[in-house]
Amino acid sequence: MVDTKKDYQKILGSVQKPVKGEAGKTGTWSPKKPIIDLEKCIPAKSGKPSCFNCWLYCPEAVVTRTIPPEIDLEYCKGCGICQEECPVKAISMEEVTIE
Amino acid sequence: MVKLMEIPDEEFIYPGTRACAGCSMALIYRIALKALGPKTIITVPASCLTVLHGMQGFCTTKVSVLHTPFATTGASASGIVASLEDKGLADEVNVLAFAGDGGTVDIGIQSLSGAVERGTNFIYACYDNEAYMNTGVQRSGSTPPGAYSTTTPNGKIGYKKNMAKIMEAHGIPYVATAISSYPLDLYEKFKNAMKIKGPKYIHILAPCPPGWGYNPKDSIEIGRLAVQTGFWPLYEVIDGKFILSKDSQRFLDPTKRKPISEYLNIQKRFKNISDEDIKNHQNYVEEQWKQIKKRIEND
Amino acid sequence: MTITKKIPDLTKRKTRILTGNHAAAHALRQARVGVIAAYPITPQSPVVEKIAEFISEGKLKARFVKVESEHSALAVCCAASATGSRVGTATSSHGLMYMYELLPWASGNRLPIIINLATRATGAPWSVWTDHQDFITIRDVGWIQMFCMDNQEIYDTNIQAFKIAEDPRVFLPAIVAYDGYILSHTMMPVSIEKQDKIDEFLPPLKHHINLSDVSVVKGIDPVTTPHIRDRGNEGTVPGYFEYRYAMQKALENSIEIIMDVHDEFSEKFGRSYGNGIYKTYLAEDADILIFAMGSVASQARNVISKLRKDGLNVGLVSLKLFRPFPSSQLRELFKNTNLVVVFDRDIGYGYEGVLSYELKAALYGLKQAPFIKGFIVGLGGRDVTDQHITKGVTKAIKESDEEIISTKTDFLGLKLDDLGDYDQKEYFKGG
């Protein structure tokens, strides 16, 4: 077996492994965050899988397709697409402080 | 037509990427990876997508990605496919090439043409934000006429290269157009492509908030307008047969199409567009749909 | 490492009469490459034609991607190598120039790709004949570069190149070069070894990347910052500077491995090429040494005996390993020489012949450095003759005696006197 212990031998090409938040906590990009009003939200009200526009249209994959949908505010960039696409205006963008 | 609950739950992109807030490309990529699944190798040239994948050491996807020089996406995909075929793994692993409009219609057109002419078994997806956005909004062959870019401050002169038609002319088994604003349609098109052996090409319009000049929250609506004005028809060409997609079918009727100015006027990149330019755009839309109508009647 | 002399068993191997191009093709076949991507270019085209023939006859189980350009050829090779296959290709001159963007990509990602280079002059003006310009032009991109002097050496060096490139202490791509037409199209006897013996010498590739294993998620070649990147318990990774340091050190330290692989090959197959990095002919007692590569060295070899009969103590050093440049070995070799006459079939425009100035740099600091005189010969396929070599040695001796050191290049073999009244300004006038 060849010996590859020298420092330069431990480095080959530039490679990556997957991590969450590669760009850091992107939730800090916007003070405004989507808050879901569960009294208006269609799946929350019906208890059945339905609508889920916020999950479908989120470019950041921070919305879960659960009843009710949950948004990961640590990484949500506050783009506001979910608010625009919610058919019953259940989402409002509000200033939120993340602990 | 795919139903929302048929789309798998599993995400293949971790949140917290460097993509802009409201980036259509990020949504397109998220949907595409759900369609392709975990047994996929992706190759990506210099583009906004490179940035989404992350800097050294740490990436954002749950599938492997090979970054490749700008002009080589088609060739890189050919190489991956060739190696998989040599190892007998070609039927088990999907190969996806994902490039921007600049990397496809301009600098990457040669290697893409070669790859499809050789019958390479892969999917090539071009996300089209209509300029070299990653380097700061310079015009590309895919920039529509009249649009502002840093290299066409008075509006682009010329036309938008119709890459889908060019791919059709190569006689490949699957060509489709899609858009971020219709993700179910997009998902279905990737799924349809996966069922076919040979080169598949999907051209996906991707509205860009900083490049096109609009509030990120409107990314979906702007794309919708692109379809509703008839500017961006959604269709597939499967073995030469033209199929107008469900979401575009009602726009065969010109009275159902919204005027193109509704789409152009809300984008800052068109703010200095002349009335003549708007007329030209409208004529382009009319002409495009005349052709579509003819194709449907003849097929 | 000592080489035990063995009488090769001629019954166990096949001797064919092959061109250099076909010798390369046979070597690629026997190295069991998995993917070849190549584009035709004079004078390399017969390599890819032969590969296509092997595949169609079932003699080579490989995927031959018939790309639409050399730029794509090397891109396909890089992608196929990163996916985990053994990869080889061939090109010349402008094909290599067109691949240029991918050359540092291959070395930076540490992909063990082998390129066969049938050397050919680079335009303008357009030329299909040989010189070494294409070979030297790519010397700074981090590839191992070796030059061959006959067709057997082309075959042998290809086999060794895969073993060197795939060594875990190396993992760098390599170019095996040979003169266009002079070797590429000239037939010579080449012993083709038995496949099982080659397999013993060259085991299957164990790549450090291997994207085909989709259970392990890898991002390959992302944008890399100037800085180290520290993400705490998720890990700390190098910056660009460290990646490139590693590449340079691997290249420097590969000389030892190149020599070991050469010796191992000699031991097994009974053929050697000096020490694997240079060959010498009558150099031990020489006080004048000729330094050259490839076809120029072959030509010089003819002249040594005649020069010795004329009373000159001349020997020859023909360089095989050009990159990494074996400076310490050459310092050792030349330290007791009085005069080195360098013949370059290339030129570092604006400076000198590349072998000439690289040798000068390598011998810098020697207490008693030899006098070094360089000549430019044979560009664009102009014949390099015995007379040129003799004239060069004579002139070098004169200048060394008179201690004339000039940084202007000296060309041998020009025919300016035969041009008469040629003047490009007048050329198109009148009818």
Image (tube, grey):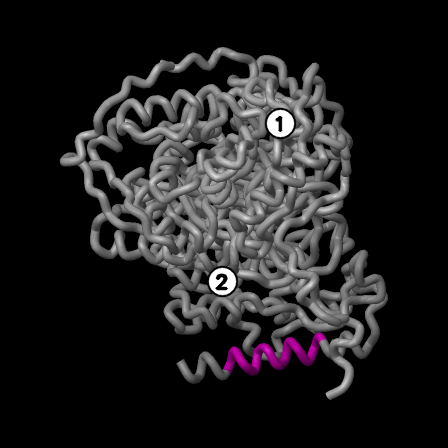
**Residue at point 41%, 58% (across, down):** C45
Would you say residue B282 sits in the magenta stretch?
A: yes
User: What is the secondary structure assignment of the residue under circle 2?
Assistant: helix
Q: Tell me where residue C102 appears, x and y as whole percent.
A: 56, 44
Q: Is residue B9 left or right of residue C416?
A: left
Mark 1 and 2 residues: CB-CB less than 8 Å, in contact?
no
Q: Nearer the viewer, residue B205 or C55?
A: C55
Dot 1: few (<14), some (14–19), or many (≥20) neighbours within 10 Å? many
Disc 1 marks a residue whose amino acid type is Arg
Q: Is residue C185 above or below residue B161?
A: above
According to the image, label 2 marks what residue? Answer: B113
Q: Is residue C348 left or right of residue B273?
A: left
Q: Nearer the viewer, residue C71 or B104?
A: C71
Return the residue found at the far bottom.
Answer: C431
Q: Tell me the mark number nearer the camera, choosing from 1 and 2.
A: 1
Start and end of the magenta stretch?
A: B281-293
